Amino acid sequence: ILHWQPNQGSEMNSQVLEEISQCVETLNGVKEGSCKTSLTFYKPNLQDQSAVMDFPRDFMGISMPELPNKYFLIIRGQRIVLEADSSILVIMEKLQSYKPKAILNFEGELYKLGDFQIRVIKVVPHQTETLKGIMVEIDYLPISSVENSKQIMKEFIDIWKEVVSKKSLAGEFTHAETNYAEYGLGDNYTSQHTAVQYAAAALTQLIQSSQLRS
Amino acid sequence: MFCYLLQHVEALEILLQGLCGVQRERLRIHEICLKSGPHLGTVASEVRLLCDLEQSEPSWSVRHVGGAMRGAGAEQVSVLVRSMVESKTSKNALRLFYALGYKFDHELLRVGFSFNFYRGAQITVTVASINKMLKLHATDEAVPVTLGIQMVEVIAPATSENYTEVATAMSSFCEYLAPLLHLSKPGVSTGVVPTAAAAAAALMSDGGGTTL
């Protein structure tokens, strides 16, 4: 996942999103459809609010459109990811120990570029139209090994950044490596790896949003 | 519905094999019960983590069991009705719930067998010993809570619209087990079946060909 980092003082707006989408089409990307991943931040339901520091503040849940019967739970600070049947949401509702605090939607347009799949994603708080962030998610379909696909992914990212730079937009794409081993995940890329990336993306967006406000 | 069984487990297995028409499945389930820690939730909550040790790769699920149905409707059915929600999970469930503030309450190991079949409802019969761990999570060192006793449980999923029909199907099925044992709601004493020894002998002598 690459994050769009606007220059200091620049805005995150739909014009930038449109320009980025055009970059995909410049590379002969073919639009294949839309997708929406939802991420929920949870907060503990406490009898005594002063105890809030005793509980994780980065507990998130993720639903992915391509896996409607699954739900992913992440506690980022402790590097825990859990894949569960979507009935886990019913269990959480019955336990009443954690409640949703905020929801971020990652609304993407899916493009196919040869063996690559690109999602151009706008990050939007639930039930609003406010554009909080822009991301690009890149998949290299033939290889499921994280390690073995690193070189080809790096080459693609370099090409992508070059194409974007020609648009002279007020910002750039940044990319941070994820240490999947810390989550107990193996080299074979799975939907749990994707969940970990989206959790990291959500927190990056939160930090970016607060930096833009200040 | 359930009961405790001291003897005739083998005979019961033969009887169930004949009634259900399906292969029995071996059962080895590690059940860890967690309760919410101090301050967490406006009311205390409990969740069970189950690890199926019979699979080549242990598989986990999380289960929430609700309170029993009460009132006139509950008294009219011969089975215990309560909500149960289960979710299969990847292996990090215990770590996740500990990190969320849940605390270990107790654990046990169920070892035995089960039959899963359709007879008016999707019914599961389990016959298992309940074992406790002498050291935390040491399933290889489990010992029976009460030596020689097995628990027989009959359960079936139902909705709020059809639970009376499901209860009827369960009760009808349980009548076929009557020569060996009587099942009832938890908390209701059943006693020993006087014909059990003779019935068991008949089942053991011809491997289930006897009609009881």
Image (tube, rainbow, N blue to C red):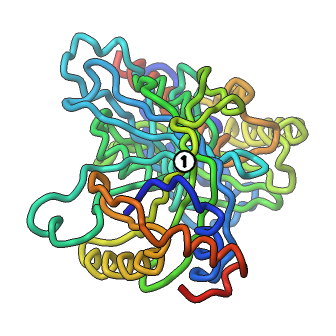
Q: Is residue A136 visible?
A: no
The residue at 53%/40% (across/down) is B31
Q: Is residue A51 visible?
A: yes
Against A117, is B137 above or below? above
Q: Quadrant of residue B161?
A: bottom left
Image spot of residue A55 (x, y percent): 38, 19
Against B20, is A175 above or below? above
Against A101, is B89 above or below? below
Image spot of residue B103 (x, y percent): 42, 23
Q: Amino acid at mark 1?
A: Ser
Query: Regarding mark 1 in the picture, which secondary structure is present there?
Result: strand
Image spot of residue B6 (x, y percent): 52, 52
The residue under label 1 is B61
Can you say which quadrant of the picture contains the C terminus of chain A?
top left
Q: Quadrant of residue A158?
A: top right
Against A162, is A80 above or below? above
The residue at 30%/46% (across/down) is A93
State left or right for residue A146 relative to residue B4: right
Q: Nearer the viewer, residue B140 or A19?
A: B140
Can you say which quadrant of the picture contains the N terminus of chain A?
top right
Q: Nearer the viewer, residue B201 or B18?
A: B201
Give the letter of the chain under mark 1. Answer: B
Q: Quadrant of residue B170?
A: bottom left
Q: Nearer the viewer, residue A187 or B75?
A: B75
